[in-house]
Image (spheres, rainbow, N blue to C red):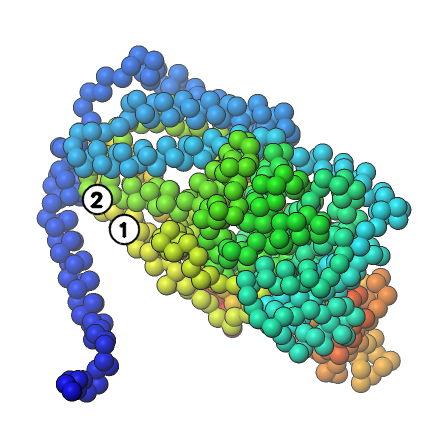
Amino acid sequence: MRRAAKPVSGTPVGTQTAIAPWVWALFIVSLLVFVSTVFVLSWDSTGPTIFSREQVVLGDRPLPGWLQVPLDHSANLLPAVGTVALCLMLRFIPPTNTTRLLVKSGLVFLAVRYLVWRTVATLNFSSGVEATLSLFLYLNEAICFVSFFLFTVHTIWASTEQRQRQADRFSQAVISGEYLPTVDVFVPTYNESEAIVRRTVIGCQAIAYPNKTVYILDDTRRPHMRQLAKDLGCEYITRPDNTHAKAGNLNHALKHTKGELIAVFDADFVPFQAFLNRTVGFFQNPGITLVQTKQDFYNPDYHARNLGLEHLMPNDQESFYGYIQPCWDVANSVICCGTSYVIRRSHLESVGGYYTRCCVEDLQTSFLMRTLGFRLIFLNETLSMGESTRTYADFIDQRLRWLQGNLEIHYCQDEVKFWQKLNWVQKSYVFSHLLCCFSPVFRLGFLLTPVLSAYLGVLPYLATLPEVVYYFVPFILLNFAIGGWTSGYRTSSFWNEVYDTAFCFPGLRRLWLVLRRPFAKASKVTRKGVKAEGKTYNLRLTMPLLIVLGLTIAIITIYLLGYFGGLWLVMPIGSGVTFFWLLYNAVLMTVAVLSSIDQPVRRASDRFPLQTLCKLTEESQPGQSYWGQTENLSDTGALITLTSEATITSPTVRLELVEQGFGVDAAVVRVGRKGQQTLVALKFVRVSIAQNRHLVKLLYGTMTWWKQGKRAGGFDALLALLAAVVKFRPILNTYR
């Protein structure tokens, strides 16, 4: 028998020695030095580019007469000035179905006008390099135009007012007790903390509806969750494994429950007391399958908190829930969103339960239901509030999981045949949604094109500044203005671009993975209740964006220093547009990077600015009481302002909320002074279930002023975006 060769000591059999890190570092440095040397040596008086500017001079461009730009400057500015006037008038025009139709028709006209000019007059075929870059940019724009056109048409007509009137009418039968079908309320949980689940279950139990049963669906078989269900008096369901994640958890619960309707709340979503009163009535119509409600959030998302814009910026999902879903409802194209909805059990069971083949279950199940002709509707009312992602990494992880699930359903045509069974209008919505999945690709094109143009010295388009002002500026101005106007200024086109920029490179990586392995393993759930003691820079996730930002700032700096220093004699034709494009991208990327620097999160739960009369009594001195008001309140603590100076010596006190009629024991965290007043920070202790119910009902059970959606006007949003760059708050802020 031949004996196998003895492996060299220290080297595992069947493996190869990895390249040492210093070798990689030397290779990268050498490559950078080589590229930089070639780049610098190619400079001449025409500019800091690889190719001489003399090769790409525009020359005479004989345009068709109907595309000629007016020679008179006032006539050239007329379309832009008229568009600005219309944008200002939008402040006084309410966004209704009729006004949206009129204004968006004007937007489509300007878009077609721009695209015709772009197609006929701007393509550059001077050389192979110009042609390649020019066609790349044009193809990118053309696909985006298709997406833009579909989105614009799909978001003209909305069902908001119609559904709210129906809810008013249908709820009367529920409130009077004429229509009270049994409702199973599911709270699926995987790794959420007991405090988060307790709050949601208490909120579900507080719903003003008599014929309901609340279930904790624990997918990790935790004994303390079973005990929590017992303590709260709700039902508890678990299973021996985690097959198919949340979809499997819900399907398992279907087999062990029997309510006519099912309401689902993620473990971090707390419903308002009126949730079932406003939704159940729709099911008097036997053709209704599902009622999805709007999702809102009681905490600012990562970008607003990191940038210090909590007072101004709405959540990034406001556009989808407050603007897109009501319009998709018109064509029976509503998407189930995983929480805060009610579904008819019989219809759900008729499709085999929740769809399990993809990494998420909500959109996929709604697609399956629509192929069978079921009716899904959207009620554009805030009837629950949940926890928004608190960190950049969690935001990216959540959106990547959604992106993967949205693409995976297109690989399931053997089971969910929506391309065959939906009508053409519904298919157009599906196609629009599919194009949105590839937005990272389009965003990459818009980020890289001006950088490549500047470094190579080539023009991806042939256009003079007057042409850009005449054809492009009116379209882009109205497009940005409409983005906020149509949603009542609860969204901003500028900030949507920041989100797209932040998601670009992580999204590209996930797209590449899904296209190669559609059903690759994805994360199961977004983290909740995240706490952090210090800043997190997330360099691993933002490094590609930082590289593109660095290249952009470098070429801008070189252009300016060289031009004003006399190194290159002129700013070549077309560089003005490219230069502005570089500046705009630099601002977007800077804000995206700054917002990714997570600031510390130290409180266990969110504080709400509830000001109410209270009395503080020292535990060691029962006769010593102080009057004041709460400055903020949570279900775990409070900040109190006492009306007079006070010396509090007891480590624990009794806080009584006078107007609400209940009290709670609290530990004194710190005592301070504010003029003649005393500030007392408290942490609640020995909170009973009854007291917890009072706090949850007070803070989460109804719509209050601090839960109203933020309204960032278009100009205000732009100023906030620029201020975020100037202040550099995420980097400069220090914490003790």
How many badges with numbers are in the image? Answer: 2
Q: Give the number of the disc on residue 455.
A: 2
- Disc 2 to disc 1: CB gap under 8 Å: yes
Residue drawn at point x = 71 percent, y = 54 percent:
263
Q: Residue at the front extreme?
A: 1
What kind of element bears circle 2?
helix
First-in-chain label (2 vs 1): 2
* Amino acid carrying mark 2 in the image: Tyr
Mark 1 lies on residue? 551
**Picture coordinates of residue 602, whole percent (x, y):** 57, 70
Relative placement, left or right, of 388 versus 278 is left
**Picture coordinates of residue 56, whole percent (x, y):** 17, 32
Depth order, front residue of 52/329: 329
Relative placement, left or right, of 279 versus 364 is right
* Amino acid carrying mark 1 in the image: Leu
**Picture coordinates of residue 175, whole percent (x, y):** 86, 47
